[in-house]
Amino acid sequence: MPCAGGFVKFAERRLVGTFDVDGTPRYLCVKVESLNHSFECGHAILTYDDIAKLDGDCLWNGTLGKEDVQMDLVSGGVSIAGRLDTTRRSTHLILGVGTWDTVERTLSPQNNVSNVPVDLPSPHDAIKSTAKAARVKQLLESSIPIIV
């Protein structure tokens, strides 16, 4: 199965990950209601059986351990695993809903216009990305029950 390196960070009930898949950055954002702890995993490994599963909406379950994190796509074929940057005192379950994308959704406050990539997508792609971002926002803000 193909693998890609990257990182995941969890804070404020959101897990955010970035992975380099064949030279293309893939961004993951997962809303996790059941976890109130922050953590970082600077050397996470993404394993997938089909690159098509790294696009669109997704459901996850997994475990935040004392020293590592392990998450699996509920529909199968994709997993993220790695050792935490700092150890923890307890283990927690991770249940979340999120989305994959190849376009970073928002600029951080530290970024400015000079940091925006010059190879901007076509207007059609921008419309699709805007619609997808609105769908993702609605999905992340909703309280959709997760059935495992």
Image (tube, rainbow, N blue to C red):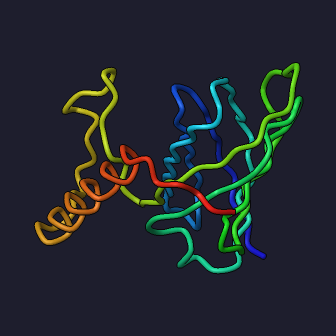
Counting from the top left corner in percent of width and height, residue 54 is at 54, 68
Q: Nearer the viewer, residue 17 or 133?
A: 133
Count of numbered badges drawn on the protein: 0
Name which quarter of the figure residue 11 lies in: top right
**Residue at figure coordinates x 76%, y 42% from the top left:** 93
Name which quarter of the figure residue 110 lies in: top left
Is residue 86 shown above or below 76? above
Counting from the top left corner in percent of width and height, residue 59 is at 58, 61
Is residue 89 shown above or below 46? above
Q: Is residue 2 left or right of residue 127?
A: right
**Residue at figure coordinates x 81%, y 21% from the top left:** 86
Q: Is residue 118 left or right of residue 96?
A: left
Is residue 51 shown above or below 20? below
Q: Is residue 90 left or right of residue 40?
A: right
**Residue at figure coordinates x 88%, y 29% from the top left:** 66
Q: Is residue 67 left or right of residue 59?
A: right
Q: Quadrant of the N terminus?
A: bottom right
Counting from the top left corner in percent of width and height, residue 8 is at 63, 40
Is residue 78 shown above or below 91? below
Counting from the top left corner in percent of width and height, residue 75 is at 65, 73
Q: Residue furthest left?
A: 123
